[in-house]
Amino acid sequence: MSNKRSNSFRQAILQGNRRLCSKALLEEKGLNLSQRLIRHVAYETLPREIDRKWYYDSYTCCPPPWFMITVTLLEVAFFLYNGVSLGQFVLQVTHPRYLKNSLVYHPQLRAQAWRYLTYIFMHAGIEHLGLNVVLQLLVGVPLEMVHGATRIGLVYVAGVVAGSLAVSVADMTAPVVGSSGGVYALVSAHLANIVMNWSGMKCQFKLLRMAVALICMSMEFGRAVWLRFHPSAYPPCPHPSFVAHLGGVAVGITLGVVVLRNYEQRLQDQSLWWIFVAMYTVFVLFAVFWNIFAYTLLDLKLPPPP
């Protein structure tokens, strides 16, 4: 991140831009398909014309948006493998052998730290996977093209970890599956960035598209809530929790917004960045100590290990 533009450099560019009567990027003619795609991504994600021009002139597609594509392919591959091995693709979570997978977060196995992250490769069913994959590709890939794999990967992974830790604190008896924590972190950050820069965002039909995105997110969240309280196929262990969605949203509207609002600028120069990093660190430490001590102190009856 140290090679990003400083605030003083950005001010110099902005002052120089005011003295130039250059035409808007949308008025450029004779662009080929790839150039039109890059211009489209710029208008989808960046609120300032100077940033859109900077991105359009400097983007080389090297490296490509590999992070979101790789994560999506891995999620699909694990889902297909589980579907074949379990003989079930719809509502896989109802299969009695589903929770035996070593990737799922289970409260009895919370000491196995990798489960706080690897649960993203397990989905409740094809209906769960489908919406997450669509949102990852439609929102995550353009964001990664603009902000890079490091920053978008940071927001995504932070949302994933916050999601599982939030479940371990607020819904202590439930397992967790699915990549909704990371997906909701990215989508929430993107929607919040659009709202906060409404006049500057020039993407087409932005009100309609925001409404569609919110409806899709609400439907997925409603599905997760319904499944959580639906009678379990393997009592006494409940179905997976929906709290990971909320953990992802919290990361998106804090860390995620700071990342998206500071295109090509050093995050370490932003005071809000350090405030939200400190808040996230405090939450992680609190959740770790909660997992170590609270389950014993509360004498909580957990479901048996799978």
Image: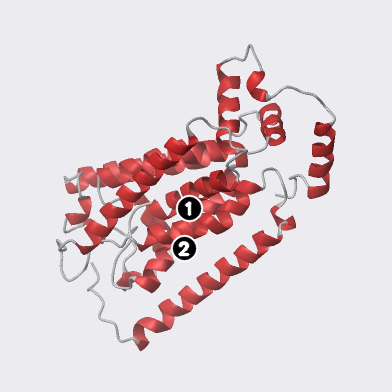
Question: Looking at the image, which is closer to me, 255 or 87?
Answer: 255
Question: Looking at the image, which is closer to me, 260 or 49?
Answer: 49
Work out whether 38 lies above or below 190.
above
Q: Where is residue 84 in the image (x, y as percent from the top left)?
A: 21, 42
Q: Which residue is drawn at 62% across and 15% down?
A: 31
Q: Is residue 69 visible in the rendered structure shown here?
A: no
In front: label 2 or label 1: 1
Element at label 2: helix
Quarter holding residue 53: top right
Work out whether 35 lies above or below 53.
above
Work out whether 165 lies above or below 211.
below
Q: Residue at x 71, y 61 (%)?
A: 271
Residue type of the residue flagged with mark 1: Ala
Query: Residues under labels 2 and 1: Cα distance?
Result: 10 Å
Question: Looking at the image, which is closer to me, 237 or 241?
Answer: 241
Are dots 2 and 1 in contact, CB under 8 Å?
Answer: yes
Q: Mark 2 points at which residue?
A: 162
Along the horizontal axis of the image, is 107 left or right of 61?
Answer: left
Quarter holding residue 18: top right
Instruction: Tally the marks.
Output: 2
Q: Name the residue under label 1.
A: 185
Along the horizontal axis of the image, is 197 left or right of 174?
Answer: right
Q: Is residue 230 visible in the rendered structure shown here?
A: yes
Q: Position of residue 231 (x, y in %)?
A: 15, 63
Residue type of the residue flagged with mark 2: Ala
Q: Where is residue 193 in the image (x, y as percent from the top left)?
A: 56, 47
Quarter holding residue 270: bottom right
**Quarter of the image containing the C terminus?**
bottom left
Q: How is the image coloured?
A: secondary structure
Q: Which residue is drawn at 57% across and 43% down?
A: 149
Which of marks 1 and 2 precedes in the sequence? Answer: 2
